[in-house]
Image (tube, grey):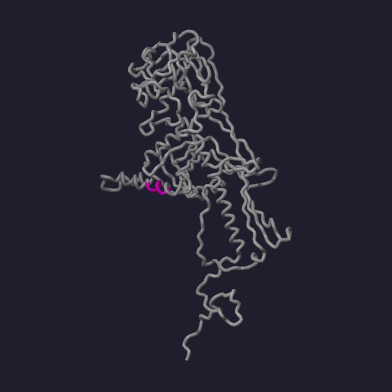
Amino acid sequence: MATSTPITIADLNQTDNETTLNIGNLRRAYAVPFGSDRLSKLNIDADPLFHVLATKRNKPVNDTHFKIFEQRPFLYKRYAYVVGWKTWSGTGDVPVTGYTVNSADISTLTPQTVGSTFALKMGTDYNSVGNIQNVYGQATNKITIGAAGTLPIFYMENQIIKICTKSATADLVADDFITCRIKSVQTSGYYAYLGVIVVGALKTAANKYLCSFTDATTPISDTYTYSRGHDVGGTKGVLETMKTYVVGNAFKSGSGLPGSTNDQPFSTRYGLTQIQKHALAMDNSTMATELKFVSNEYQRLWSNVVATHKWDIATDLYFSDLYEEADGTRHTQGIVPWTINYGNIFSLTTSSTEDSFINDFSTLLDPRYNPIKNYLFCMDTYYWDWFHKVGGYAYNNLMLGNATATYGAVYANSLGKDSKIGGATIFQYTTYHGPVNMMRDIHLDSSPVKIIAIPMNNILYRPLVGNGINRDTTIYVGVNKIENTGVDSTTNLIQTEFGTELTLPETWAVWL
């Protein structure tokens, strides 16, 4: 007697069976999930940067070529560097020739004596048209002291200037200073010449070397490698001590009106829109065929096309470079080439410490240079992990020599936390500059960029919208159909025309 039921009968080699259409076992299902309810699927997260910009920094533009305008304040621009000096009687117009330009020692001018008069040759390192300044680490677009366009335009008689000095030519910071009133101003080429009288003398005569000289005989020329507010690695002076600022003015009783100057704070750039297209075509017979797992193959593939479209936009947001080809194909400005070509350049290695990173922050966020505080720091996977470990390192350091966790817990726990901005995961790293929002972006894993600082006030995602036509991301269904082409297939199209507006490169930074 049979004791079992045959449940494993296959259709293979059955009479009149079509061998190309085998479906396997005729009776057992083996719990195969015909449908999507038990299908394990790897869901890739949406691109974080594109998501943040499209939701938080979206501003349409109505031209494929658009102008961008920048304005830089003049408040901290009333400075120059002493690059030459000479004796002067204190009367008449100050001369514009005959200056000593190869000695930092000004002892012959008797700066330790109130009432001494002498002449100074002054050059600066920013363009007066647009107040465009040097950017830290940016050699390509550096502005050398005394270069074309850098004439100091702000000097007037009766202004008070402060000149920093040091006790040795190799010193990196100021040891003393003198204040002088301007009695005469002349210009020649891209330099200003000042005849001055000492009103605040050196405290010590030995502090006789100009801070604006990098050694005994060389006045500073390139300033882009100097931090403004702190020493870089113990090897460079503080740039602020090398500058001679206007610090006020003084007039005698019964004097007339002071002079006046007008700065020109505006400059321009341009942007381009770029067209991204992706399409999917399929013959209509295949479209009508229902499959296992996901019955509609066209819908499955179309979801891939949409995801690819968004991914490619995000990739161009990072890596595209502003360019229009001869045939009219336009490329918008990506943030990585923009920052590498124009922004602050810092170094970050596996031996870098939290302290060195804070020094970089101090350089980038110096209020005389960059008032922006609203940043998004995008980073590759390695340094995303590194910053999450910083809290643990700090905790361990604070714990050394302590018997309990009391001393380190508060600091370590407040060092960083995860949050969301526009749906993207943000790690908030706390410094004395304020909270710093950091985001991992795997686009950067395949680039030389470790971290890029994006000033959110100075970036816009700009889809083309004008004359009632919206060229932002749009899906066109059935651009090719049997009804209008006679071809038995269907094609859908997804298209986006967008640009980026990136401004004020001194507010951007990259760590390489």
11 displayed left or right of 211? right
| Residue depicted at x 63% and y 57% | 280
Q: Where is residue 64 shown, x and y percent of the image?
A: 65, 41
Q: Quadrant of residue 459?
A: top right
16 displayed left or right of 353? right
41 displayed left or right of 482? left
Q: Where is residue 218 shown, x and y percent of the image?
A: 41, 22
**Eyeballing the image, is 501 above or below 50?**
above
Q: Where is residue 42 shown, x and y percent of the image?
A: 50, 60
Q: Which residues are magenta?
A: 384-389
Pick the front one: 103 or 406: 103
385 drawn magenta: yes
Q: Where is residue 246 shown, x and y percent of the image?
A: 46, 21
**Quarter that holds the C terminus:** top left
| Secondary structure mostly taken by the magenta-highlighted segment of the chain | helix
**Eyeballing the image, is 19 above or below 502?**
below
**Eyeballing the image, is 64 above or below 28?**
above
457 drawn magenta: no
Q: Quadrant of residue 354?
A: top left
- Counting every numbered tag in the picture gives 0
Pick the front one: 192 or 99: 99
Specify the farthest residue to the bottom: 1
| Residue depicted at x 53% and y 26% | 127
Specify the farthest residue to the front: 326
